[in-house]
Image (spheres, rainbow, N blue to C red):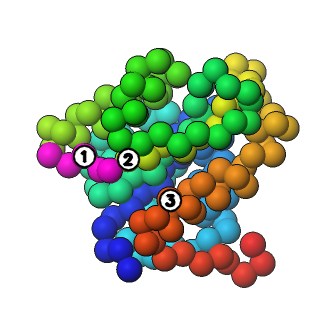
C-alpha cells in the first residue's frame, strides 16, 4: 500500500454549467467510494492561490477540471509533469492560472506534489446553470474512471460503497 498523501482535488465553478465538472466528479467519488486513510478528496472550488497550503500537504495530487484544448466537447484529457504549465499558460480559465500560481508557490515551501490533471473539454462554461450540459454529464463516469486509474497507478486502496 502506498503511504504517501494522495489528494484528489476538484476545481471549478458549479454556477457555470460545465465549469463544475471537477467538483461534480469529486462529489461522486465521495458518494460512491471509501478511500484509504492516506487519501483526501477536496472540493477546491475556485480558490486558486488560496489552495497553496492545502496543495502543499499532498505528495501526489490529482486535479479534476475542465480543459479547453480545442477539441470536441466531451473529449477527455490527462496532463502531467512539464506539460501542466504549458497547457495552463494557454489561459483556459482564471482559476487555472491561480491554481498554477499556487502550485508554483509551493516551491517556496519546498513541497510541490507530483501532479496530474484529468479533465474534459467543456461544451458550455458561460451559461449560469448548476447542471452540467448533457454532453459533459455523460462523461462524468469516465472522469471518475480516469481518477480511479490514477489511484491504481499509485497503488492506492479504495472500495466501492454498498449500493453505490
Q: CA distance from mark 2 to mark 1?
A: 8 Å
Measured as percent of width and height from the top left, residue 138 is found at 81, 45
Q: Residue at x 25, y 46 (%)?
A: 112
- Secondary structure beneath disc 1? loop
Q: Is residue 12 above or below residue 114?
A: above
Q: Residue at x 75, y 46 (%)?
A: 139
The magenta-colored residue range is 110-114
Q: Which is the main secondary structure of the residues drawn in magenta?
A: loop
Report whether 117 appears left or right of 106.
right
Q: Which disc, if any, is residue 115?
A: 2
- Residue that badge 3 annotates: 150
Assign the C terminus to one quadrant of the image.
bottom right
Q: Which disc, if any, is residue 112?
A: 1
Q: CA distance from mark 1 to mark 3?
A: 18 Å
Measured as percent of width and height from the top left, residue 121 is found at 66, 31
The image quadrant of residue 4 is: bottom left
Q: Alpha-carbon neighbours of circle 1 within 10 Å: few (<14), some, or many (≥20)?
A: many
Q: CA distance from mark 2 to mark 3?
A: 11 Å
Q: Residue at x 64, y 59 (%)?
A: 145
Q: Alpha-carbon neighbours of circle 2 within 10 Å: few (<14), some, or many (≥20)?
A: many
Report whether 143 appears left or right of 45.
right
Q: Is residue 164 above or below residue 97?
A: below
N-term mark: 2 or 3: 2
Amino acid at each position: 500500500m502506498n503511504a504517501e498523501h494522495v489528494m484528489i482535488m476538484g476545481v471549478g465553478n458549479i454556477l457555470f454549467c460545465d465549469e463544475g465538472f471537477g467538483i461534480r466528479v469529486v462529489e461522486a467519488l465521495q458518494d460512491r467510494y471509501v478511500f484509504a486513510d492516506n487519501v483526501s478528496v477536496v472540493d477546491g472550488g475556485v480558490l486558486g492561490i488560496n489552495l497553496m497550503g492545502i496543495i502543499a500537504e499532498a505528495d501526489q495530487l490529482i486535479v479534476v477540471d475542465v480543459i479547453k484544448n480545442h477539441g470536441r466537447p466531451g473529449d477527455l484529457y490527462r496532463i502531467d509533469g512539464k506539460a501542466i504549465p504549458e497547457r495552463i499558460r494557454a489561459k483556459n480559465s482564471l482559476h487555472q492560472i491561480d491554481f498554477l500560481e499556487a502550485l508554483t508557490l509551493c516551491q517556496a515551501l519546498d513541497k510541490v506534489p507530483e501532479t496530474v490533471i484529468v479533465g474534459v473539454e467543456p461544451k458550455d462554461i458561460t451559461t449560469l446553470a448548476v447542471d452540467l450540459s448533457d454532453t459533459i454529464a455523460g462523461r462524468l463516469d469516465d472522469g471518475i474512471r480516469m481518477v480511479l486509474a490514477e489511484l491504481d497507478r499509485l497503488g492506492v486502496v479504495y472500495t466501492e460503497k454498498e449500493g453505490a
